[in-house]
Each structure stands twice: as structure tokens, then as C-alpha cells.
Image (cartoon, rainbow, N blue to C red):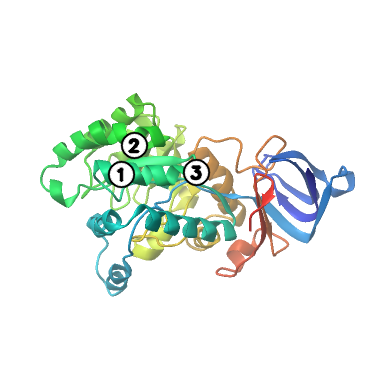
Amino acid sequence: MTTLITNIAELTTNVPSHDDPTGVRRDAAVLIDGGRIAWVGSAADAPDADEHVDAEGRAVIPGFVDSHSHLVFGGDRAAEFEARMAGQKYAAGGIRSTVAATRSASDDELRSRLRGFLDEMLAQGTTTVEIKSGYGLNVVDEERLVRLAAEVTSEVTFLGAHVVPAEYADRADEYVDLVTGPMLEACAPYAKWIDVFCETGAFTVEQSRRVLRAGIARGLAARVHASQLGPGEGVRLAVELGAASIDHGTYLTDDDVVALAASDTVLTLLPGVEFSTRQPYPDARRLIDAGVTVALACDTNPGSSFTSSMPFCIAIAVRDMGMTPGEAVWAATAGGARALRRADIGVIAPGARADLVLLKAATRVHLAYRPGVPLVARVWKDGLVVA
């Protein structure tokens, strides 16, 4: 079964062309064959197909790649958000309240909420999502969180080292022994990635190194939460161990920026966090101009960023972080793919997965220009219309 999408006013391919890394084509067409892109070119040169879709002069972009989320959890933290808006400072310790709610929820309750969040994401154009554990913090519950996540995505991250749970208060090193031993053994069969929150109030750089090295030895690839609450050593640890991404990066030193620019580690910015916590927005312009590869993600979680909207994050990145609309869309698609070390998504090119989004607008600029407006007309995932 082949499908031809034609009469596309603006096609963002993310295949670099001349001085345009987003590879924009005008008056374009795309041929889908099964679950893959078969052809991309001018509408005037389009081949025939079994099915034709008229884009009606609207824009098409790759499906969003959300490379940082925490979708499997119980309860919410609306009261904490309200208190924060009244002036209370954000702290990592709030995670423990979600741990309690998650441990008391059944598999079916967690599964139902997870699928609800995924439906939200699809409706807003997200076709690939990474999902972390981190709200179980014991062997049994961390195992079930990665197991449930693996039912819906191949991009599963074991984040047993999210914070130290209450039962291990003042015994952080013993908890790291648990994470790197029985917990890792139980979770590794369902996970692709190992992550750690290297931050004051969570784990020290020495503890973080232990966690990451144990995961790497078990065959998992590394990711790192770092520099969210203040400057630290997490960026250099991520670069040292060849992590695919360092996420947050709200507080970066000049040395951090230089190290990232010289590495293959992607910096994943999470503007929903700064929106929700009232921390300063990272200066994406500084990072891009320095040569750092930047991704955008939602960090959907009940505490610091309870949004599942990549268009919302794009709008913030353009308005408050110094990105152009093209850079923000690239970061939310190809940038996310690089953060997951994937070449088959985040791009519209022959051989890539047929994950596309048709917008209710003639250009991608409207994603930032019309914030909060539902601009997704149709979503294809693996060649099938899913929203």
C-alpha cells in the first residue's frame, strides 16, 4: 500500500541543503510505502500511488521525538505546583510523594494512565517517546515500571537512581548498591538506557559514575540528568562516559559548553521545567552558536513539568530561549532522534520511518506564532494515520 501526500506548501525534511540544516522544500510531495518513506521531491514530479492525500497548501514536518519523559506514575502534585506558584522553591525531594502514589497503584491503573498520556502526545504530533522509570525506587516497583514502559516503546530508561527513597535516608551509598545490583538485574531486560540524577539533593558525581558504569557493563547506554538546580560535574561525567545526552542543563559553565560542543553528547533542553518551576530559561542561542547539539523534550512528569505538548515547548524555546522556529522544530525532531542515537526518525527521507505531521498552517513558524492553538491536522506513524 502506497500513499502520496502532495500539495505540501512547506516540507521540513531535516536533510541538510546548502545552508539550511532543516532541508525545507516548497510545493513538495512525499511517498509512503508501507511504514517507510519511499520518495521525497517536487509535487510536479510525484509518482503515482494507491492513495492520495492533498495537504491543501499546508506544512508537513517529521513526527516529534520526545527523548525525555516520565510517563509511568501514580497520583499528581497539583498542590505542590500551587505552592510553588505562591513562592515555594522547587526541590528534588518532591519526587518521593510520587513514589508513594506509584507504589500503591496497580499495574492496570498505571497502564491506563500511560496510554492516556501517549494518546495526548500523538494528538500533538509526537510519534516517538522515551520513557523513564524512577518512581518505584525498589526492585519490585522499578521492574514493573520499565516492564510497563516496554509495552509501548523501545526507548525505555532505567532511572532507579532518581532520588534516594525515604527508607534509605542517610544511607545513599547503600541505595546505590541496590540500584547497581539487584535492581539493575531486574530492570535491564526491559531497558535500553541507564540514567541518574546527578544533582545536589539526589546523587553525587561519584555515586552517579558508579550507577552509569554498572549500567554500561550490563549493556545499557548512558543518559544523565544534570545541572538542573545549579552548576555541577554532571556534564563532564556525561561526556567522559560517552552518554547519548545530558538533560536539563539549566546551569552550565563555559567549560561545560566547550566540553559538550567537542563531544557527541546531545544537550536536551526541557523548557516545560523552567515554565513550571520558575527557574531561568537556558540560553539556547549561546549553546547553538557554540556548536552544541540541542534537543527539545517535554519531561512529562507530575512534579516539575506536567505537559505533554511539544508545540508548547517549541513556543517557549522560540520566545524565551533564543531559538528560531526552524531550530526549535529541528531540536524537537532530529535533535531528539540524535539524543536517542536514532537515524530512522526525526527526518523525512527515503528509508526513514514514515512518521509525519500535517499542520493546520502553511509554515512551521505557526507552532511558535500561535502558542496554545491545536495545529496538528493529521499524524502518521509507521505509515498509518494514528491521529
Q: Quadrant of the C terminus?
A: bottom right
Residue at image point 48% right, 60% down: 116
Residue at image point 20% right, 50% down: 201
The part of the image, by quadrant, that contains residue 190 is top left
Q: Position of residue 307 (x, y in %)?
A: 45, 62
Q: Position of residue 8 (x, y in %)?
A: 78, 55
The span from disc 3 to disc 2 (Cα, nearest Å) is 15 Å
Q: Is residue 334 left or right of residue 232?
A: right
Q: Position of residue 167 (x, y in %)?
A: 14, 49
Cβ atoms at labels 1 and 3 below 8 Å apart: no
Q: Is residue 302 visible?
A: yes
SS label for mark 2:
helix
Cβ atoms at labels 1 and 2 below 8 Å apart: yes
SS label for mark 1:
helix
Q: Amino acid at mark 2?
A: Cys
Q: Is residue 53 left or right of residue 229?
A: right
Q: Which residue is mark 3?
A: 153
Q: Amino acid at mark 1?
A: Glu
- Identify the disc placed on residue 142: 1
Q: Which residue is mark 2?
A: 187
